[in-house]
Amino acid sequence: MQALGSCAATVAAVAMVRDLFPVQDSPKVFSLLMLVISVSPMLAPTVGGYLVAGFGWQSVFVALFAMGALLLVAAVFWLPESYAPDPTYSLHPRPILTTFFSVLREPQFFTYALTGAMTFGGLLAYVSGSPLVFMDIFRVSGQVYGWIFAGLSVGFIGASQVNTCCYASTAASKLC
């Protein structure tokens, strides 16, 4: 369930950028989106460590539920409808499978898919393996691990902001 929710959030964020912003602004908006995506894993272990220390492990799930409920309310009431459904698209299985297999026949698809999969796989390997290294091998507490993870996330934020600055103006984008 978590994986489906995470995938849906990622796809929805990319679709919102595509639907709500002009093409020339997409690189800048995606860089800002990367900033938000980078800040969340930086804050999560830190806040989670303090929640567990102060209120027990169950408090993490209460906090996640509260944030999810807030996001649902915000999406329902404040997120504008950005794309009218196209009646020419069918949700029947046959056209969906036909389109799916036509995409699989494109050589470029595998280049982009494998690049994205390896990049995201490396990130997930780091995120899932770093607690073991820092907390079990180096014996740091949950709170200290959160601060270490936050410090390492600054690199992600810095790189995404370099891209944002490069696309801030036409003159700057020529320099990059």
Image (tube, rainbow, N blue to C red):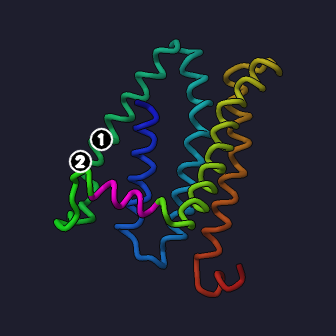
Which part of the image, by quadrant, shows the N terminus?
Answer: top left
Q: Position of residue 164 (x, y in %)?
A: 60, 68
Q: Residues within 10 Å of mark 1 (few under 14, many from 20)?
A: few
- The one of 41 and 9 positioned closer to us in this rendering: 9
Describe the element under mark 2 as helix, strand or loop.
helix
Asked whether 142 or 107 is in front, the reply is 107
Q: Amino acid at mark 2?
A: Val
Q: Residue furthest top?
A: 56
Percent x, y of residue 131: 70, 26
- Res. 76 mark: 2
Task: Check the image and report above or below for 45 versus 136.
Answer: below
Q: Is 17 left, or right, of 97 in this rendering?
A: right
- Residue furthest toward the right? 138
Q: Residue at x 58, y 76 (%)?
A: 168
For the residue pair 33 and 7, the one nearer the viewer reads as: 7
Is 124 above or below relative to 18?
above
Q: Which residue position holds label 1?
A: 72
Q: Is residue 94 magenta?
A: no
The amino acid type of the residue labelled 1 equals Leu
Distance of label 2 from label 1 (alpha carbons): 6 Å
SS at mark 1? helix
Q: At 77% from the left edge and 21% from the top edge, which residue is drawn?
A: 140
**Residue 108 coordinates in the image, percent (x, y):** 56, 67
Is 148 displayed left or right of 164 in the figure? right
User: Which span of residues is magenta-colored?
Assistant: 95-103
Q: Residue 54 appears at what percent x and percent y? A: 55, 15
- At 64% from the left and 68% from the top, the residue drawn is 163
